[in-house]
Structures are given as C-alpha cells and as structure tokens.
Image (cartoon, rainbow, N blue to C red):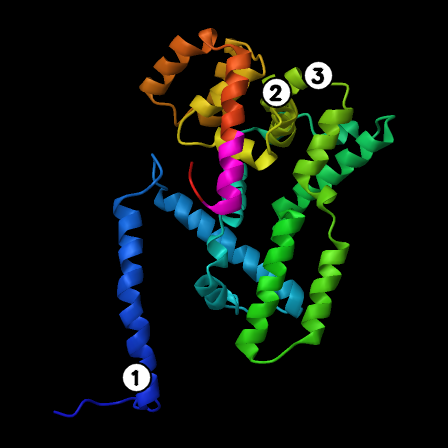
C-alpha cells in the first residue's frame, strides 16, 4: 500500500532533516526524563509553580518583543522557539528572576493592602530623596498591578541587556534579514532604562532614608508591606532583594526563621511573620522545629549561615553549578 505524502514533505532533504531532529531528540529525552525522576531539589516544583514560571517567561518575552517590533504577535512570541532552542531561556539568572516574581505575587497576596502603611505616607516627607523614592515605589507597584505589558522594566540592567539582544538576534534569524530599525529600538530602550525605577530599588532607598528603624520594618510586614519588609531584611543581612523573596517563599519556613533570627527579631514577632506568609503551608514538623530551635539560635550564628547561602547563590547564578 502506498503511503500518502503531503505536498512538500516528500523531498529527501526534508526527510533527512526531520529524521535527524528526532534522532537527536531521543538523547535529549534522556536528560528530561532523568530530571523528572531524579530532581536535584529537595522539593521538586509543583505543577502550579511550573505553570506560573512558564506564563511569566512567555509574557516577558512577548512584552519585550512587542516593544522592539512596535507590535504584538496575537498568539505567541515570534522568537519563542528560537530562544528556547538556544538555551538562553534556561539561564539560571533569568529563571531565578522569574521565580522571584512568582514568590513576590504569592507573598504580596498574603497582606491585607488596606491595612498597609503605603509608601504614600512618605510623599510629603521633608527629605526630598525619600519622597522621590516613595513616588517611584508607588509608580512601580501601580505598573505591576495594571499588567500594562512592561514586565521587562523589572529586570536588572544586565538581564535586560542580554534578553534584548537575544530577542533582536532571534527576530533577524526568524525573518532572515538584518533590521536596523529594531537595533535602533533596542539601543533606545537600553539607553533610557533606569534600574533605580524598579520597586526593589525604590524600597531600598526608603529604608535607607526613613526615620523608621529597620528592626521595626523587619518585624512588622503587615504594616509596612512586602517591599519595605524585604528591603529592610536586605539592608540588615546584605542579601539581594530577590534572594530574600525566594527564601521567604522556600519550601520550608526554616530559611525565613533563620533570617529573622539574624536580625534579632523576637520569637513572638517571628512567629507572627511566618504565619502571615506561610500560615497555610506550615507542617507540624516545621512548627516543632521552630518552637524548639528559634530561641536558641544566636544572631551571629544565623548571620554566618546566611553568608554561606549568599556565596552559594552567587556561584550558582554565575555558572549554573550547584555547590
């Protein structure tokens, strides 16, 4: 019986190409299967986390691509397949950034916003730098809530630079031609970008210039909100903002407890904070570990341990290797 062939698929070169793709695919499948069966994380990602990361990554590429092309592909980013195959979208620093945004969304939703001391309280402050930082934070939070298609504005300068030129290259590969207009658009975007306009940078300035002591901000996130709470922890512990977000949102409350202990937060306030962000996730075992260990944990010991975490994270983000 003769096998029906679709038009254009009966060419031997296409047959060879498809054959080669699927021949190589059986090797790639080994890696994918092994990562599923033998995950490196103590607690592998849930389906919800995978879905959230995927959605945010697609949105990020779509937003930046639309900015460069001055139009949005209605279905899917034009450059997605090329970027996926290049391996760039798997870069540790990019995935870490996306996971921090997922954590930020979940943790922010834990706080009753109507009870938070908004950054607007600092708008009329006599210190102009503090007032400016408050205005910047409010603008960044508003932009985030509106979902205005500017997710790339939350990137670091380094990440934005890398992703922008990766997308420019992918567009040119996709269309098979150089695009001076897109290159000019990329240069314009990068030259106008200001990392200080990000929410975390504005929050750091508020913590620095505010009359409110950092231990008050650390101990009362339900009053000061997530951004100022994390910025205060960052100031005290010398940890990156996104690192702290991910530690608070870790699969256990223990990293958050260690950070609070390093800042000298009382057991009562620490327990309050943990229940605020993780009340529905705490297991009896976690509660027992906290109850028996927190009061005995010295701030200097906790700080030393956190220093190891920072070094390990820096090593991972730079080279993709776990310690």
Earlier in the chain: of badge 1 and badge 2, it is 1
Report which residue position mark 3 lands on: 213
Query: Does the CB distance between marks 1 and 2 fall below 8 Å?
Result: no
Residue 76 position (above or below residue 291): below
State whether residue 105 appears in this view: no
Q: Which residues are magenta?
A: 310-320
> Residue at point 72% right, 36% down?
202
Residue 259: mark in rendering? none
Report which residue position mark 2 lands on: 218
Give percent across and percent down for residue 320: 46, 46
In whole angstroms, how far apart are the C-alphas of marks 1 and 3?
69 Å
Mark 2 crowd level (few <14, some 14–19, many ≥20, 10 Å Cα): many
Q: Secondary structure at mark 3?
A: loop
In whole angstroms, how far apart are the C-alphas of marks 1 and 2?
62 Å
Report which residue position mark 1 lands on: 15
Identify the image quadrant of the N terminus. bottom left
Asked if the stretch drawn in magenta spans residue 312, the answer is: yes
């Amino acid at each position: 019986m003769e096998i029906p062939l679709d038009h254009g698929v009966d060419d031997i070169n296409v047959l060879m190409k498809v054959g080669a793709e699927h021949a190589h695919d059986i090797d790639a499948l080994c890696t994918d299967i092994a990562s599923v069966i033998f995950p490196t994380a103590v607690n592998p990602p849930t389906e919800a986390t995978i879905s959230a990361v995927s959605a945010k990554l697609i949105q990020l590429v779509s937003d930046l691509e639309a900015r460069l092309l001055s139009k949005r592909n209605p279905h899917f980013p034009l450059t997605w397949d090329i970027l996926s195959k290049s391996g760039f979208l798997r870069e540790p620093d990019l995935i870490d950034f996306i996971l921090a945004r997922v954590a930020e969304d979940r943790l922010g939703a834990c706080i009753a916003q109507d009870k938070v001391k908004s950054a607007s309280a600092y708008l009329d402050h006599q210190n102009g730098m503090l007032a400016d930082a408050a205005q910047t934070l409010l603008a960044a939070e508003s932009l985030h809530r509106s979902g205005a298609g500017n997710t790339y504005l939350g990137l670091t300068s380094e990440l934005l630079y890398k992703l922008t030129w990766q997308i420019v290259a992918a567009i040119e590969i996709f269309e098979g031609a150089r695009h001076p207009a897109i290159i000019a658009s990329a240069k314009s975007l990068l030259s106008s970008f200001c990392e200080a306009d990000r929410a975390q940078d504005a929050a750091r300035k508020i913590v620095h210039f505010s009359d409110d002591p950092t231990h008050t901000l650390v101990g009362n996130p339900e009053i000061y909100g997530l951004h100022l709470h994390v910025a205060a922890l960052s100031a005290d512990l010398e940890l990156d903002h996104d690192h702290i977000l991910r530690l608070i949102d870790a699969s256990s409350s223990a990293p958050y407890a260690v950070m609070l202990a390093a800042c000298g937060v009382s057991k009562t306030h620490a327990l309050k904070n943990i229940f605020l962000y993780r009340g529905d996730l705490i297991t009896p075992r976690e509660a027992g570990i906290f109850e028996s260990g927190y009061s005995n944990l010295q701030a200097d010991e906790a700080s030393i341990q956190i220093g190891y975490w920072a070094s390990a994270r820096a090593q991972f983000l730079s080279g993709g290797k776990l310690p």
